[in-house]
């Protein structure tokens, strides 16, 4: 009977052959001493037919280089990408021909596996945004906010609250249009309130929808009696809670301001004595037409009827009953339309006892109207030299037939 011999490497690198014995199971780590060469059986061992004498020679031995599997992972060494380390899956993430089980750089990014913050994912820059030791390329929570990337509405910006005002796919902290009004936040005058029209009544850079002082008058909207019209004084003549600036009947007389002859004074009768379009109740010249209501001195009396239009005089006193009131009359006790004042002393010549202001009363002055405090009169004709047309020739009449300024007495 021909015997079949099983040959193979034993542990410790020994090679042995023996008769095949049916139904014999040999442990992988068995030794020759444990089971005997005759009974040794190993699935990876070669089967050798040695004839009846069961004595194989060298020519009958299997090719050991072709058939060995020293890590016993079921992959022959020639095909095994990690021949010394069992890795039946032969996984090789970086496709460099060296299996992951024995590759010192499993992802092939140039960094040793032990130092690589993404050992299975190529990331030579080792970026780690949240500093958690896991590289961004393999970090399931890039921004470290406790929300995993697939469900994080801002995966690269920490936002654990996941606020998303406009309910789009981007969280507020990484949304360039937080309110979803199609106006970028950098240009939006109401970043957190949708206002596509960007209305800004007071042009202060804050859109109306988020401006707490719409009209820019320094009064908050909640307290402003004219929320859309600037009126810092909050005037409300009829005390109806609506400021005059935005009240269509500011005086509350039942007549709309547009047709009211006195929009800021109650005037239900609308009387207008001078027909100038301004009601008597508010006309500063009731009997004199003055539609412009000009009042230069601010004394509530229009220039058209003010007896001193350039001088404040509320009482309009006029003692001498001329055309000028006492406040601007340089001779208030003498009625006169001559308001000349030769010496410009504020006293009109009509009532000035020293019209030339030389300190000599007119009654004694030998040159009334000409300043001559010395009163010199060389020719003794009663006319002072300052006004004498012949100062050296006696000529009290001061006759000057040809009107040349030289008296006749000096021309003969």
Image (cartoon, grey):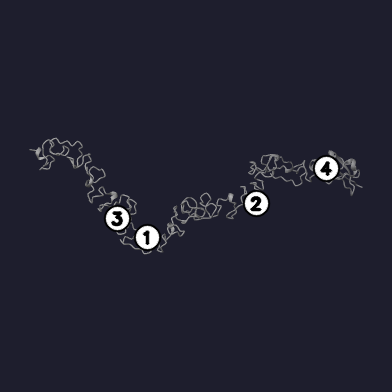
Disc assigned to residue 150: 2
Residue 269 rendering spot, x and y as whole percentages: 36, 64
- Circles 3 and 4 in contact, beta carbons < 8 Å: no
Q: Foreground mark, 2 or 4?
A: 2
Crowding at mark 1 (Cα within 10 Å: few <14, some 14-19, many 20+) = many
Does residue 52 appear to the left or right of 140 in the view shown? right
List the residue tagged with mark 3: 305
Quadrant where the image shows the C terminus? top left
Does residue 410 appear to the left or right of 101 in the view shown? left
List the residue tagged with mark 4: 62
Label total for image: 4
List the residue tagged with mark 1: 262
Residue 308 rendering spot, x and y as whole percentages: 29, 51
Disc assigned to residue 306: none
Disc 2 or 4, which lies upstream in sequence? 4
Q: Measure the C-alpha gap from mark 1 to mark 3.
A: 19 Å
């Amino acid at each position: 009977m021909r015997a079949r011999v099983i040959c193979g490497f034993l542990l410790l690198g020994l090679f042995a052959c023996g008769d095949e014995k049916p139904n014999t199971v040999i442990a992988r780590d068995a030794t020759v001493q444990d089971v005997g060469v005759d009974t040794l059986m190993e699935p990876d061992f070669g089967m050798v037919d040695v004839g009846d004498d069961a004595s194989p020679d060298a020519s009958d031995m299997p090719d050991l280089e072709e058939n060995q599997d020293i890590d016993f992972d079921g992959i022959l060494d020639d095909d095994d990408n990690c021949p010394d380390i069992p890795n039946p899956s032969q996984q090789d993430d970086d496709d460099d021909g060296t299996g992951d089980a024995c590759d010192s750089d499993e992802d092939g990014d140039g960094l040793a596996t032990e130092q690589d913050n993404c050992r299975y994912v190529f990331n030579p820059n080792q970026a780690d945004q949240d500093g958690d030791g896991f590289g961004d390329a393999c970090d399931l929570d890039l921004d470290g906010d406790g929300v995993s990337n697939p469900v994080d509405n801002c995966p690269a910006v920490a936002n654990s609250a996941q606020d998303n005002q406009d309910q789009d796919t981007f969280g507020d902290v990484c949304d360039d249009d937080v309110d979803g009004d199609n106006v970028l936040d950098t240009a939006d005058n109401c970043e957190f309130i949708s206002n596509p029209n960007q209305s800004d009544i007071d042009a202060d850079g804050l859109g109306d929808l988020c401006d707490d002082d719409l009209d820019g008058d320094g009064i908050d909207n909640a307290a402003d009696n004219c929320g859309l019209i600037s009126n810092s004084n909050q005037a409300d003549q009829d005390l109806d809670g609506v400021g005059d600036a935005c009240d269509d009947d500011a005086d509350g007389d039942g007549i709309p301001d547009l047709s009211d002859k006195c929009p800021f004074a109650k005037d239900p009768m609308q009387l207008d004595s001078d027909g100038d379009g301004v009601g008597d109740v508010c006309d500063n010249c009731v009997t004199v037409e003055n539609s412009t209501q000009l009042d230069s001195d601010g004394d509530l009396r229009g220039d058209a009827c003010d007896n001193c239009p350039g001088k404040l005089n509320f009482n309009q006193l006029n003692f001498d009953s001329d055309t000028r009131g006492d406040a601007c009359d340089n001779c208030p006790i003498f009625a006169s339309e001559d308001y000349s004042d030769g010496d410009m002393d504020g006293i009109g010549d009509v009532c000035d006892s020293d019209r030339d202001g030389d300190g000599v009363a007119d009654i004694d002055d030998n040159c009334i109207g000409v300043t001559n405090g010395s009163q010199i009169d060389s020719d003794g004709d009663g006319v002072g030299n300052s006004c004498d047309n012949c100062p050296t020739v006696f000529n009290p009449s001061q006759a000057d037939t040809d009107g040349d300024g030289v008296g006749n007495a000096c021309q003969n």
